[in-house]
Image: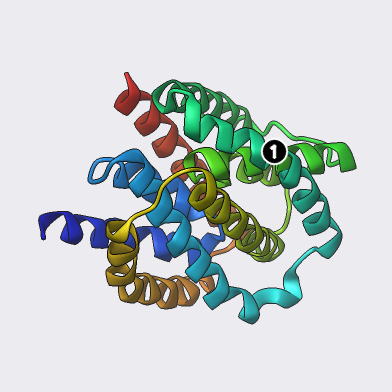
Amino acid sequence: MEGIVISAMIVLFASVLQACTGFGFSIMATPFLLFVYAPHVAIQINIILSILISVFILPKIIKDVDKKLLIKLVKGSIIGAPFGIGIFLFLDVQFLKIVISLLILFLTCLLILQFSVKQTSAKDHISGGLSGMLTTSIGMPGPPLLLYFSGVKIEKAVLRSTTLAFYLFIYVVALGMQITFGSTNKEIWFTSLILVPVSICGMILGQWLFKFINQKVFQLITYVILGVTGFYLLFSSI
């Protein structure tokens, strides 16, 4: 019961961020759910709830989706996803978390220093590929997209809607691959079902808060989320 209560608090906060920013759920939920559950359980709960969130929010903001960019991200993720499932099945997740945390912290520092990236088709595909790999391996597609989109200064409404549309695709792919090649059980589905109402409450609150967030505040939230996530992944893996 204690685990469910802690999980509900994590999911509520992460759902608010997801609805408010378009990227907060997996970045915040997965690392902290690892405190409560085994890695494969935490990752799959995150993926199931992320699919629900995307389905719930996307119809309301689909008009802002950058369709050309979305197609490039999807193409890249199709290449990256199989590599991720190999990591999920065979490689040390702790080592991967350390590498990701150092990368996140390094790139966050660059963004705070107003480092900018020129958007190109190749970089769109690469960010999609890295996101696909991280989704199927540790259930966290957010860091590559968030870092890239922040660097190219994509407007917040387009960022939120395009990432949510991409997440719906890649999370379904990731869940299918993990069920096929990995493992799933009743605990994962039962816990996810219990946390659904909490996710919905968080999404409603997050959509309301989105109206009051301007671009500068949005960028500040981005930096804080990346910094917290990077430090957490690093210290929890050492």
Who's the residue at 44% across and 32% down the image? 230
Say which quarter of the image contains residue 62: bottom right
The quarter of the picture where the C terminus appears is top left
Residue 27, position in %: x, y? Answer: 46, 46
10 Å neighbourhood of mark 1: few (<14), some, or many (≥20)?
many
Who's the residue at 47% across and 43% down the image? 182
Depicted 2 relative to depicted 35: above or below: below
**Residue 138 or 28: which is nearer the viewer?**
138
Q: Considering the numbered disc 1 on the image, is that residue within a helix, a strand or a loop?
A: helix
Who's the residue at 70% across and 46% down the image? 149
Q: Amino acid at mark 1?
A: Gly
**Residue 148 visible at all:** yes
Residue 178, position in %: x, y? Answer: 51, 48
Residue 97, position in %: x, y? Answer: 44, 28
**Residue 152 visible at all:** no
**Residue placed furthest toward the left:** 1
Residue 235, position in %: x, y? Answer: 32, 24
**Residue 43 or 226: which is nearer the viewer?**
43
227 sits left or right of 219 in the view: left
